[in-house]
Image: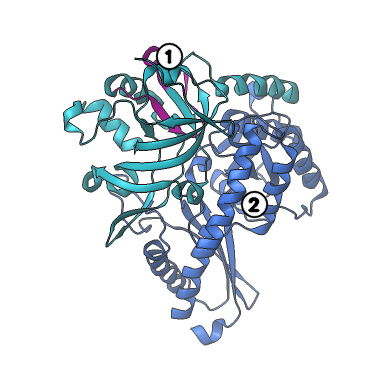
Amino acid sequence: MKSKKLKVKKNKKIINLPLTKADVLTLKVGDMVLINGQIVTGRDKLHKYLFNKKPIGEQIPFNLEGTILYHCGPIIKKTPKGFKLVAGGPTTSMRVEMYEQRIISEYGLRGVMGKGGMGMQTLKALKENGCVYLHTIGGAAAYLAERVKRVVGVWKLEEFGMTEAMWILEVKDFPAIVTMDAHGRSLHEEIEKISFREFKKLIG
Amino acid sequence: MLKLQNAIVELYRKAATSLPEDVAKALRLACRKEEKGSNARAALSTILENIEIARAGERPICQDTGVPVFFVKVPAGLSHLKLKDVIIKATRIATREIPLRPNAVDMLTDKNSGDNTGIGFPVIYIEEMKDKKLTVDLMLKGSGSENIGQLYKLPVAELKAERDIEGIRKCVLDTVYKAQGKGCPPYIIGIGIGATKDQVTRLAKEQLMRNLDDVNKQKVLAQLEKRLLNDINKLGIGPLGFGGKTTALAVKIGANYRHPASYFVDVSVSCWADRRARLVWETVKSEK
């Protein structure tokens, strides 16, 4: 698979989904990106389910290969025209650290998006599988909702409820920053080291 | 009581969609301090834009509309039970109309009640005051930041934290260091000190209701607040943990008397979206 070489607009790399492994390898920690295409949401319950029940690809109503799994529990309103996303910022990714490694490799994800970063297990999985962690703007739910153009579908709504269901969202110019890349670098690990030195100095 | 119910629905709307001006002002200042072109500055610019979009469109600032926490001050004679009932009814309406995200989950069945009410949900603290007015303070406490709070029982050997001001300072720095960017910094830090665990956690949370610009009446605590803010911002965690100059916007401390054997310090953390709003009800008598 050849990389399309991601286009750049105003210092931001443009991600058009689905992503290939070659595309992912061009992304580096610190890159600002804008995402276009279909992404899926998933948080605590969905991760637990995918990890323990191990549904095969065909049992999930959409193809997860090459897409981004967004850690998000949105507010969605049912309107006569269908579902509308009212607010949709990221949730803390670290809560699904114990599940993510297997989910990345089994479902062929090319991106995981959330906030706060993830741990060493996920970082290892990103490198082994060619995947990237994208950090979007925590709390900016109204801003990010404007970049969700359409709710395409939903899975497990009855069983898990609105917050925990898997929603497929079509996004345009959805902003994020690469904070963990497929080359083994993690901004979170680096910041933690810097802050640890300062912390030690401050507590003496 | 119907008027009060409607007013509480509006209080929810205000808290969820309109960030208090003191917090917005602190965020604008923080944005200007970060380097141009940095991830920290980009994040804060987006946050500021988000605040405006939410306010203008009356949409929730954050999809996690949190755990509603009420601090209510009632005049003598007003029934606490009736008041709780009004708050619960208003919560159901607000959840449907604004809308808020239903966040109340039964821990035994794992079912979401769908309307933000359930056992102990929302959290309601009521206190009777000599004042004739009814004051309802509401905070929508996001759980990303709630999860990074810590409770300490001093002394803590690993931190060399003894039972003194210096010990408190070390605990707070420990909380923020451990939190890193997981709870959406820049943070607002509430600290409660006292004799029992339940009391200090509530006291810490109450500090998050204070205006960021107010100054602690206790001189020693005012100095500690200032010093801690300065120290926390040296950690370099920065907005959303991207690295940068502003990790916290404010530190607020409340202290009660303690038992000779106990020295509890609770650190409650708010994300940058410190969503709080106040309702003052002057005409209580006519509403009964």
Question: What colouring does the structure picture have?
Answer: by chain
Tell me what hue chain A is rendered in: cyan
- The N terminus of chain B, quarter of image: bottom left
The residue where tag 1 is placed is A127
The span shown in magenta is A108-131
Q: Work out whether residue B207 can be spotted.
A: yes
Along the line of sight, which residue is nearer the eye, B120 or A65? A65
Is A59 magenta? The answer is no
Residue B227 rendering spot, x and y as whole percentages: 78, 38
Q: Chain of mark 1?
A: A
Three-letter code for the amino acid on which mark 2 is drawn: Gln
Along the line of sight, which residue is nearer the eye, B104 or B200? B104
Q: Nearer the viewer, mark 2 or mark 1?
A: 1
Residue B10 rendering spot, x and y as whole percentages: 50, 69
Q: Tell me where residue A45 sits by quadrant.
A: top left
Toward the bottom, the furthest residue is: B286
Residue A87 vs A185, above or below: the answer is: below
Structural crowding at the residue carrying mark 2, measured as other residues with C-alpha within 10 Å and reported as few (<14), some (14–19) or many (≥20): many
Q: Work out whether residue B195 can be spotted.
A: no
Three-letter code for the amino acid on which mark 1 is drawn: Lys
Query: Circle 1 — which element?
Result: helix
Residue positioned 21% across, 26% down in the render: A54
